Amino acid sequence: MKIDINSLPDDPAQLKQMLLELQRSVSEKDKIISEQLSQINQFIEDYELAKRKAYGKRSEKLAGNDEVFNEAEETLDDEDKALIAQSDNQQAARDKQSPKRKPLPKDLDREIVVIDVPDAEKICDCCQGELHQIGEASSEKLEFIPAQIKVIETRRPKYSCRHCEKEETSNTIKVAPVPASPIPKGIATASLLSQIISGKYQYGLPLYRQESMFRELGIELSRKSMSQWVIRCSELLEPITQALRQHLLKQRVINADETTLNVTNEEKSTCYMWVYCAGKDKLSNSVLPNIVLYDYQNNRRGECVVNYLDGYTGYLQVDGYQAYGQTKATLAGCMAHARRKFTDAKAVQPKNKTGKSDVVLTLIQTLYGIESGLVGKSFEEIKARRQEKSKPILDKIQAWALAHRDKVPEKTKLGIAIKYWLNQWPKLITYLDDGQISIDNNRAERAVKPFVIGRKNWLFSNTARGAKASAILYSLIETAKANGKFADSYLQYCLNELAKNPEDVEYLLPWNVKLV
């Protein structure tokens, strides 16, 4: 802005007032420019992050430090570089193992096919002598035999008295009772029902696809009939999930998460499927039960988790969603979620450059390296090792976040990551207090994944009753898998047993069932 010297007032007070107005005008313009630059920078970060999510690697794990930290950026100070170098020295190199084909199971039926050399060619090419067998070359291939469907025709002879028939004094007719069935008067056996259920909820085959598959086999099974069967089976199996819930609430640590579900005939089309886990997601030597339970709700309010946990006072490991804070449980945070925020900040850095987000990511990677060395240890050993090794690293990250809180703009990806870390800090260090708590909530996130994959195939539920049925059946399938059971066989066994005796379910819990 140019100022004409001749136009300046002679009065000092007027001159001062003019300069103040000019300064205020420049300051407002600078503020506007600063806000515009901040918005532009935020748009650029959002674009870079969206591009990474669309086309980049999905894994949040860091590569070896020599691949990541190959060039220092000016934003790093000496303290940041020292933290990276220290973590780099602590990172153990892991040898890559070349993949090997696993042998086929020995218990599979085998058909031996011998391909021999013709007798006319069993002659030596040199001396024309007769060749003798010195061994054999063998290889294995898998043959698929399509599933078979058969009809079980049950015949129940009827008996009456010849004498009474003549005298017409009695109409007594005796016949054997109808065998118990999950669907009384229906044509579906437990094996067919378990196949339909596992097809939809384990392998993501919607009922309309199964309808087409049965039609190719010459069987007309409408999706409406199958839908009614599925709901009936869920009602029959619900007592097992209630028993599993009672066992879940006795555990010292529970993992929880939630995801969306579209229910067309609900007041709100977007509803939620909550998941609660305990133990591991596969059979292990741990004495803790492996449990995965889903709970359908038409909202995401805190009352959903409060009612389901029913006064639970143990450790509840979750993400940063505030609704979990309404429970009586002690909350444990998720290091994977905190890492994800800094991974987003790293994604918007210049390619092959090291920025401040790499400082925290390297330290978090060191925390996970410590955890990998604790596999198989007792809970007491895990707690002691975390207090010795992990706590100092967590303190370094917290000190770094506090030091950079006012230096990094709050709306940038790095600023968001720092704010999330500081807000979650009390929960992120809870896992130091108990060796049974995991460093992250990946147990629950892995449990949500089968439901999310299935949802991509069948897309929505028509009614709340159908959504509740899905919750029950997903619970049994995923809990059975976590305890080393084949879901199809387990469901078939439970349906047969509940058809005969629906009262006692304790012996039907997955860890109590021994399938042949």
Image (tube, grey):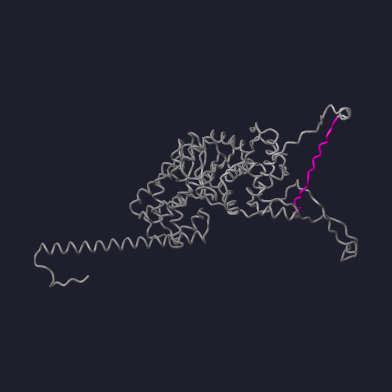
Which residues make up the magenta segment? 144-160
167 with respect to 417 (left or right): right
- Magenta stretch: includes residue 151: yes
Judge by depth and name the residue closer to the eye, 514 or 223.
Answer: 223
Say if the magenta span includes residue 285. Answer: no
**Where residue 241 sits: x, y (%)?**
60, 38
Question: What secondary structure is the magenta-colored segment mainly?
Answer: loop
The C terminus lies in quadrant: top right
Residue 372 in sight? no
* 333 up-or-down from 408: above or below: above
Give the quarter of the image for residue 477: top right
Can you give x and y, in whole percent of width and height, for residue 109 in the image? 78, 48
Percent of width and height locating residue 327:
45, 37
Q: Residue furthest front?
A: 168
The quadrant in which residue 346 appears is bottom left
* Viewer-proximal residue among 283 and 278: 278
Q: Nearer the viewer, residue 222 or 336?
A: 222
- Residue 107 sits in quarter: top right
Q: Is residue 450 left or right of residue 8?
A: right
Point out the image quarter for the N terminus: bottom left
- Is 401 positioned to the left or the right of 319 in the image? left
Number of on-image labels: 0
Q: Is residue 168 above or below residue 393?
A: above
Image position of 106 (left or right of 201): right
At a point 76% along the width and 55% down the height, the residue shown is 139
* Residue 299 in sight here: yes
Nearest to the observer: residue 420 or residue 87? 420
